[in-house]
Amino acid sequence: MKIEKVCILGGGTAGWMTAAGLSHKLKGSQTEITLIESEQIGTVGVGEATLPSIRFFNNTLGIDEATFMRETSATFKLGIEFCDWGRIGDRYIHPFGEFGEKIRNVDFHHYWTRLRLSGDASRLDDYSYPIIMSELGRFQFPDPDPAKIEASFGYAYQMDASAYARLLRRYAEANGVKRVEGKVTGVEQDSETGHVSSVKLESGASVAADLFIDCTGFRGLLIRQTLEAGNVDWTKWLPCNRAIAIPCRAADRQITPFTRATARKAGWQWRIPLQHRIGNGHVYCSEYISDDEACDVLCANLEGEALAEPNQLYFQTGRLQQFWKKNVVAIGLSAGFLEPLESTSIYLIQEGITALLELFPGKDFRASDADEYNRRMELYFERVRDFLILHYIATERADSEMWRYFTNMKLPDSLQERLDAWLLRGHIIKYEFGAFLPPSWIAVMAGQNLLPAHFDRRVDALQRRELVELAAGLKARISSSARGLPGHLESIQAFGASTNMTA
Ligand SMILES: Cc1cc2nc3c(=O)[nH]c(=O)nc-3n(C[C@H](O)[C@H](O)[C@H](O)COP(=O)(O)OP(=O)(O)OC[C@H]3O[C@@H](n4cnc5c(N)ncnc54)[C@H](O)[C@@H]3O)c2cc1C
């Protein structure tokens, strides 16, 4: 009952990540993998900021970090700087790392809350190593000794996604993946089971397989158009539905080790620095701003000369009802999209690949595998959704129609519970599946001025004087260590990625 032939339909980031992942893990199993893509249709052409999990994906495949950095013109990413979200003029960084260190096994943010409630004005950010590093424009790899504050963070990359797809293509083809160029114009289904049996290309050729992976982007050619797997629409919570992207030249060597997301009146703008250019985009809600005005806002806020024509994108936030239906599994934009505020799409692709490999079916396609896959992906998507909504509702902004819309919004219960637990006593509800660990929730909630009224009572066991000394010592240690680090550009160059540097 072993699957003999797998067909991946689509060659964007999702298609080539899936091809690379499957060809690596199924090596030696004699499973034949074919990928079909159409140059005529092309890819979505955005998706440059990532989460730290991408490093584990590359490591698993054995892709050398220096090669990856050089080929994708990548920079290091320690987090995201959010400007004007809680209030106009505010700025904070959501870092990939911890705040402070546990004291007597209690999370540091509780001690900070105690200090804050007794009048101490220190920022929580001052106790985060990756935030101080980011503010200073420095970068260093985490220390291998987990006991050190210098090990209290992770990092991701800002990269050229098309170059990443090319790198993965080379990798997958070297592992035996067969690439077919052409546009799919027809789909054959088994008359009894409804399973997809083959796809027909414009050229007249057809490709048959046991398992199909739909990586056709927003089209969802197999999962949506053929199998009608159903859509769960989250527009009421995440109403942004369009984006315009324009790359530009970098001004004054501002290759920051973080992505920036600046809130605007009808959405927000991203800034993603690569080695050779800055990726910019304006994500917005078409109900509150026209395409022309959105483009003007973006152009007015470019820091250097535009390097391409505007790329206009349309989307609807939400997810599939069934990610795996019959013999088709959707990975990538075909599975759903939650807008790029926290760079989660590539992460969701990765989770899709991992879950598929763990539950890899036989030709009998047991319903329990699909059910488990669907349950898991549903959780991943919902948890990202809640985290994204948080950014829009944790705000005092009411200066435009969009921001006023969020002030009256009824939240998903899962998010409301998290907010209640945090606001009461700084507790973060933990979960098994999900991209964002407690420090991420703390960063956004505290960064957008949602602060707990109380703290964990175990904190009282420490004398105030002792706590003040510990906190001051920690802050000084972070600051002095971060000041001794190399600059971000220096770190990239030292890493052998200098060939693409133009800044
Ligand atoms: C505005 C915006 C910003 C984003 N920013 C980020 C970010 O910063 N970080 C992040 O992680 N993600 C981001 N994403 C998401 C990211 O771009 C996607 O997750 C990623 O590019 C994967 O896309 P994909 O491969 O699913 O689809 P696509 O790139 O659209 O690829 C679809 C593939 O299917 C092929 N295809 C389609 N129809 C046919 C057919 N009939 N026959 C043959 N081939 C066909 C196409 O040729 C193409 O190869 C962003 C998305 C948007 C819209």
Image (spheres, rainbow, N blue to C red):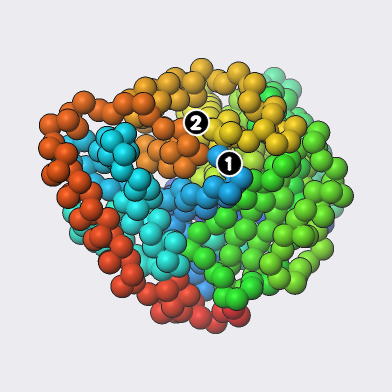
Dot 2 amino acid type: Arg
Q: Residue at x 25, y 60 (%)?
A: 476
Q: Which mark is residue 87?
A: 1
Splitting the image into 4 quarters, where does residue 7 fall?
A: top right
Q: Nearer the viewer, residue 24 or 42?
A: 42
Q: In this figure, which residue is indicated by the disc labeled 2?
A: 383
> From the viewer's perspective, is residue 272 above or below residue 84?
below
* Residue 152 image point, x, y percent: 29, 53
Q: Residues within 10 Å of mark 2 (few under 14, many from 20)?
A: some
Disc 1/disc 2 C-alpha distance (Å): 25 Å
Q: Report the side of 128 relative to 75 (left or right).
A: left
> From the viewer's perspective, is residue 372 above or below residue 495?
above
Q: Residues within 10 Å of mark 1 (few under 14, many from 20)?
A: some
Q: Nearer the viewer, residue 373 or 390?
A: 390
* Residue 469 image point, x, y percent: 17, 50
Q: Which mark is residue 185?
A: none
Nearest to the eye among marks 1 and 2: give it.
1
Q: Residue at x 67, y 33 (%)?
A: 398
Q: Nearer the viewer, residue 49 or 21?
A: 49
* Residue 93 image point, x, y percent: 47, 51
Q: Earlier in the sequence, mark 1 or mark 2?
A: 1
